[in-house]
Image (cartoon, rainbow, N blue to C red):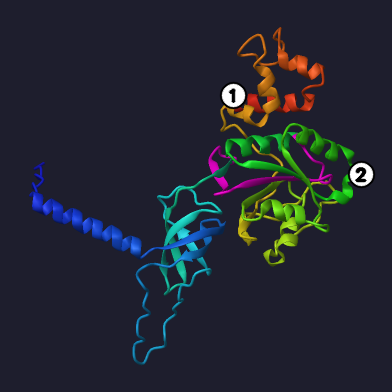
């Protein structure tokens, strides 16, 4: 096969090509809008326009004798339905993006994802990591007396918050049911004693303390299905119109009403409602990352006789001694051991 020799370009030609490429990049950038991903449905996204393209879009003049073609004039604050370029990483609710607009169809294309300041990731059933929500400031871990709460799930969320470098706040919702389940209140006191911020709320009560806490922040609500995340958001911002469902009378488990994360503007910040979960895998984390969610265990573990102590049957285990002395909650140690084992297994 005859080889084709690449022609050598002169310095002048190289400079001209680079100048043309730079001009194309700048022109492309000037033709792109900026937006904020509000939610997604499969491969389609709802994007709120935050900045229009520098290059104005001009509607073509109608052709004589033909009806006027469709044209959607872009405007800041409008929601556009978009799809994303296939070469992009998964786009998430809360992403700030650059997009191209097609007023002839009223749809856009996500061309680039801007750098994220934070991201909450979750593994799916295929062991792929997917972002739940990004560019967050606070994580509200919501639980309630009903559906029956899981302290292990709360511990998992605390680990995820710390790994994501977010401030977690434990929210005990449905305060009117606390008298029926003192355990839920007891857990809140336990976590508060460990230094975690806590709050008691009810969607039908006074939410001024919660409002003050989240003002000007982008906040994600996480928790089991049925704990009242959507109800809290609807009370805070009635225009959110999030769908609410009843607790299943047969199973006492929450029914999935929110199927995808959605961002709602609120009080100089934003609220992100997320789908309820009953499990949250941590196999994608390193064992030492699990420690971030258990500060009381990590601190005392420094005094174990062996540096690699598993806190099981080793002699001189300071953690086991602390559990016996009531300085560490046994349920917290059980959660810690299970999560560490899960992280090691993968």
Residue 105 pos. (x, y %) = 44, 72
Residue 199 pos. (x, y %) = 77, 46
Foreground label between 2 and 1: 2
Q: Element type at marker 2? A: helix
Circle 1 is placed at which residue position?
344
Determine the image quadrant of residue 13. bottom left
Q: Is residue 171 left or right of residue 136?
A: right
Going by the picture, which residue comes out furthest to the right? Answer: 179
Residues shaded magenta = 124-151
Q: Element type at marker 1? A: helix
Disc sitting over residue 81 in the figure:
none
Q: Nearer the viewer, residue 160 or 259?
A: 160
Disc sitting over residue 180 in the figure:
2
Residue 182 pos. (x, y %) = 89, 39
**Is 316 rendered above or below residue 322?**
above
Can see residue 112?
Answer: yes
Q: Residues within 10 Å of mark 2 (few under 14, many from 20)?
A: few
The magenta stretch spans residue 332: no
Q: Is residue 9 left or right of residue 214?
A: left
* Quadrant of the drawing holding the C terminus: top right
Q: Nearer the viewer, residue 11 or 338?
A: 11
The magenta stretch spans residue 130: yes
Q: Is residue 53 left or right of residue 306?
A: left
**Is 201 rendered above or below residue 124?**
below
* Quadrant of the drawing holding the N terminus: top left
């Amino acid at each position: 096969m005859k080889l084709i020799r690449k022609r050598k370009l002169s310095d002048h030609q190289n400079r001209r090509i680079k100048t043309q490429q730079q001009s194309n990049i700048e022109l492309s950038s000037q033709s792109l809008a900026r937006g904020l991903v509000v939610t997604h449905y499969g491969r389609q996204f709802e994007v709120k326009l935050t900045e229009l393209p520098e290059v104005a879009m001009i509607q073509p003049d109608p052709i004589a004798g033909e009806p006027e073609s469709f044209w959607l004039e872009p405007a800041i604050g409008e929601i556009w339905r978009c799809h994303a370029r296939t070469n992009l990483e998964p786009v998430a609710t809360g992403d700030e993006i650059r997009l191209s607009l097609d007023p002839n169809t009223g749809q856009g294309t996500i061309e680039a994802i801007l750098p994220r300041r934070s991201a909450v990731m979750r593994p799916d059933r295929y062991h792929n990591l997917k972002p739940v929500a990004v560019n967050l400031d606070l994580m509200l871990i919501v639980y309630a007396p009903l559906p029956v709460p899981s302290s292990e799930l709360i511990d998992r969320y605390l680990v995820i918050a710390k790994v994501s470098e977010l401030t977690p706040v434990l929210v005990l919702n449905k305060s009117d049911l606390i008298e029926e389940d003192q355990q839920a209140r007891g857990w809140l006191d336990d976590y508060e004693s460990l230094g975690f911020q806590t709050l008691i709320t009810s969607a039908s009560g006074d939410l001024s303390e919660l409002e003050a806490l989240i003002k000007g922040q982008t906040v994600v609500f996480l928790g089991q299905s049925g704990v009242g995340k959507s109800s809290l958001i609807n009370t805070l911002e009635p225009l959110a119109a999030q769908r609410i469902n009843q607790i299943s009378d047969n199973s006492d488990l929450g029914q999935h009403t929110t199927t995808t994360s959605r961002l709602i503007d609120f009080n100089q910040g934003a609220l992100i409602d997320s789908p309820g979960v009953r499990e949250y895998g941590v196999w994608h984390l390193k064992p030492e990352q699990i420690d971030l969610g258990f500060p009381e265990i990590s601190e005392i573990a420094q005094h174990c006789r062996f540096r690699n102590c598993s806190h099981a049957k080793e002699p001189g285990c300071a953690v086991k001694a602390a559990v016996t002395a009531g300085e560490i909650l046994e349920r917290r140690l059980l959660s810690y051991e299970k999560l560490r084992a899960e992280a090691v297994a993968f």
